[in-house]
Amino acid sequence: MLKCFWVALLAFVLNVLLPTPPSVAHSLGVDRAELIETRPGEYRLTAKVPRRIAPAIVTPALPEHCALTGSPNGERGGYAVVFTFQCAPALTADDTLVLPWKREGALLTVRWLGQEPVSRLAKREGNVIEVALAEWLAGSGTPLKAAKRYTILGIEHILIGIDHLLFVLALLFVVGGGWMLVKTITAFTVAHSITLGLATLGYVSLPSAPVEAAIALSIVFLASEIIGHARGRQSLTFKAPWLVAFAFGLLHGLGFAGALSEIGLPPSEIPVALLFFNVGVEIGQLLFVGVVLTLTWLLSQLALSSWWTKVVQGVVVYAIGTVAAYWLIERTLSMFA
C-alpha cells in the first residue's frame, strides 16, 4: 500500500515538473489570454499558461499591416507567453488574428485604449483559433469606415428581418400609395428611431423575448384589421394609419436596438453607429417598399378582374397573419421555457 502511494506521488511530481509535448497539450482545453493596446497601434498579446504548456503557444499570424516587435517565439516566463507587435494603421473591426496555438480555445480579454475590457471565448476551428476583432468591439478605424460599416449592417438587418418586412407589407395593404404612404412610413421611421436611440444609450431596457413576441402581435393585429376592413368594419387603423405605424414603430425600434446591441458598439462610435445603422434600416426598408410597389404595378398590367385581385390580396394577408400568429405563439412559449 505504501509502495503504491510513493509511485502515485512520483507520477504527480513528474507530470507537474516535466514539459508536456504539444500533442498532449492540445487536449488540455482552454487558457486565458489578453490583448492590450498599450499605445495607439502598439499591442501586447499574452497567453497565460504554465511552463509545461508553453510549447503549445506558437507565433500568432498577424494582419499584413502588423509586425512583431519582440521575439517571434514570444517572451516566456513562469506563467505566460508574451508577444508584442505594432500595426500601421491600428487594428480595426476588419482585422482577424490567427492563433495557431495547439489548444482547444482561448478566453480572450481585449483592452482597447479608452475602453472597458471585453472578454469572449475564441474556439479552435480546424488547426487555428481565429479572433475576429469585430466581436471584441474593435473600432472601425475612421468615421467614413464606421458610417459604411453600420449602414451595411442596417440594410442587412432589415432585409433579413422578415418580421419587420411583413409589418411594412401589411402597412402597404392599409395605405396603398400616394401621400398617405409617405406619411405612414415617415411616422414608422421616426418612432423606431426614437426607441432605437433611447435603448442603445441605455435609457430604455426591456428583455428581448417579450419585445419579439409583441412585434409578432403587431403583425397579427394589422392582418386582422385588413381582413376586418374588407368585411366593412371601420377602424382607427384605416382612418389614421400613420398613428398606428408610429405606435408600433416604437416597439419595432426596441427590436432594432436588440440587434445592434448583439453586434456590439465601441463606445466612441455610438453616435455614428446609431445614425448610420438607422440610415441603413431606412434604405433597406425603402428598397423593400419599392420592390413591392413595382410588383403591384406589374400585376395591375395583367388586367386581372377585381375579383381575382381581391383573392390574391386575401391570400397574401391571411398568409401574413398565419405566419405572424405562429411566431407569436412560438415566442410567447419561449418566454416560459
Image (tube, rainbow, N blue to C red):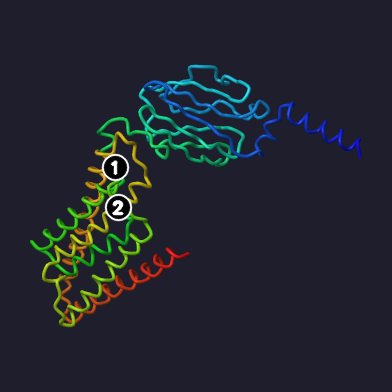
- Residue 228: x and y, percent? 20, 79
Q: Residue at x 31, y 62 (%)?
A: 163
Q: Amino acid type of disc 2?
A: Phe
Mark nearer the N terminus (2 vs 1):
1
Mark 1: give few (<14), some (14-19) or many (20+) Cα within 10 Å. many
Instruction: Name the foreground residue: 203 vs 146.
Output: 203
**How many circles with numbers are drawn on the protein?**
2
Q: Residue at x 14, y 78 (%)?
A: 234
Residue named by callout 2: 256
In the picture as drawn, the residue positioned furthest to the top comes out as 70
Instruction: Give the crowd class for mark 2: few <14, some 14-19, many >=20 residues within 10 Å.
Output: many
Q: Quickly name the residue at label 1.
A: 150
Q: In the picture, which quadrant includes the N terminus?
A: top right
Q: Against 260, is 217 above or below?
A: below
Tell me whether the residue at label 2 lies in contact with that at label 1, contact meaning CB atoms closer than 8 angstroms.
no
Q: Gap in Å between the C-alphas at discs 2 and 1? A: 13 Å
Image check: 252 left or right of 233?
right
Task: List x then y, in percent, for residue 82.
Answer: 54, 23
At 20% across and 65% down in the image, what residue appears?
171
The residue lying toward the viewer, choosing from 1 and 26, is 1
User: Which disc number belongs to residue 281?
Assistant: none
Mark 1 is on which residue type?
Tyr
For residue 106, which quarter of the picture? top right
